[in-house]
Image (tube, grey):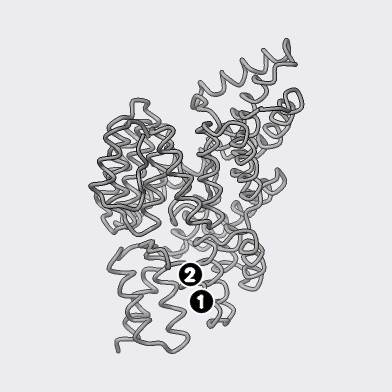
Amino acid sequence: MRRLPLLLTTAALCTGLACAGGLTDPPPTPAAAAPRAAPPAAPPAGSALAAAIGADQQHLRARPEDAAAWARLGSEYVEQARLTADASYYPKADEALHRSLALAPAGNTDALTGLGALANARHLFAEAADHAGRALAAAPLHWQAWAVLTDARTQLGDDTGATDAAQHLLDLHPGTASFTRAAYDLEQHGRPEDARTALQRALTDAYDPADKAFCLHQLAELDRNSGRTAEALDGYRRALAADPAYTAALAGQARAEAALGRTDDALAHYAQAAAKVPLPQYLLELGELHESLGHTAQAAEQYRLLRAEADLAAANGVVDDLTLGQFEADHGDPATAVRLLRAEWDRRHNVLVADALAWALHRTGADGEALDLADLALAHGWRSALFRYHRGEIERALGRTEDARTDLSQALAADPQFDPLRAPRARSALAALTS
């Protein structure tokens, strides 16, 4: 198959996609804090996944020497953790995958790829890239390992390497995993319409309800991040119609409703999403919506739950200084945020980390250093209203009035309601600069 240059025109992208079929599960956009790793195979979802786990557990009680079954079970545990936000599955996955590797140490690509997916889920991205590289050294055509490597390189901030891995994935396996990762790569490079083309091609070829819901959700995210909030709300609802269990779309629906001023609906849907899958992202967004409405006690409760979930995740091997740093910068101790985010930056030079560290530094008054990082966050062209707002406020603190006015104006032009707390602050800051 001819190579598909990810960063060509929409027409070129469409030409390449027409040769293929399928769809994906990439890392999140700036609205989503927790990266999602691709498992080495495609475990069934929901109750079918629980049944598969039970069947493999029973099989391994009778055949404990089955290395392939241990690798499969480990991957199923990783997927179950993703679906439920229950980090206690990670140690189980780790044990199963290492058991597989001990039984079959040579050429065990499924176990190595599973360990890579597990490392991505725990935010150990350098470790994930290493596991994927070992799998590919043994089996260069193992497309699942290319998916894991794409995610790891993306989160590490290896921009060229991530695009290259996504290209290999497209060449080897032009399906769900490749098209949506290609879309994410294109969006990161400031090409949301090309990303939309890739996702629409993926949606056309999707047949599984979960795959359809995922594509519809990602398309809605593109709308939401471009300020097309009503269209995004319709997209989230379509995703839920395709798969009512797709919690990310329920949280997306709440996000869009909040932006449209339907706060009662937003509060209810956020609460439902957090009850089903208590991701720190959902708890933070629900807390901030409460805070924007003056519900101090309710906001504090969501922030307490967020800290508790973060503690549980850390106890099960998850390293998430990014989420905690973002939280501390705005709702806790900015100095603690800087410490956490410097540690994260030492591990990976990802644009999400650059933006978060820039903002934390601004909150401590270190605006000169903050501006350099804010520039890095926007260097690849990602059209993020939040990134623009952060840089605008940093520029305002430095007395760079014209630059600040430009960035704050662009943030609000991209999405006038990009955040229930920060969009009003952006308008106030812009009004102050104008006056």
Label 2 vs label 1: CA separation? 6 Å
Please, what secondary structure does the residue beneath circle 2 have?
Answer: helix
Residue 68: quarter of image: top right
Viewer-side residue, 14 vs 65: 14
Residue wearing tag 1: 372
- The residue positioned 50% from the left and 67% from the top of the image is 355
Q: Position of residue 389 (x, y in %)?
A: 40, 71
The amino acid on which the numbered mark 1 sits, given as a three-letter code, is Asp
The amino acid on which the numbered mark 2 sits, given as a three-letter code, is Leu
* Farthest residue, direction front: 2
Residue wearing tag 2: 376
Q: Position of residue 340 (x, y in %)?
A: 65, 64
For the residues bearing labels 2 and 1, Cβ distance under 8 angstroms: yes
Quadrant location of the N terminus in the rendered image: top left
Relative to 416, does residue 248 appear above or below in the rendering? above
- The residue positioned 66% from the left and 27% from the top of the image is 108
- The residue positioned 63% from the left and 17% from the top of the image is 56
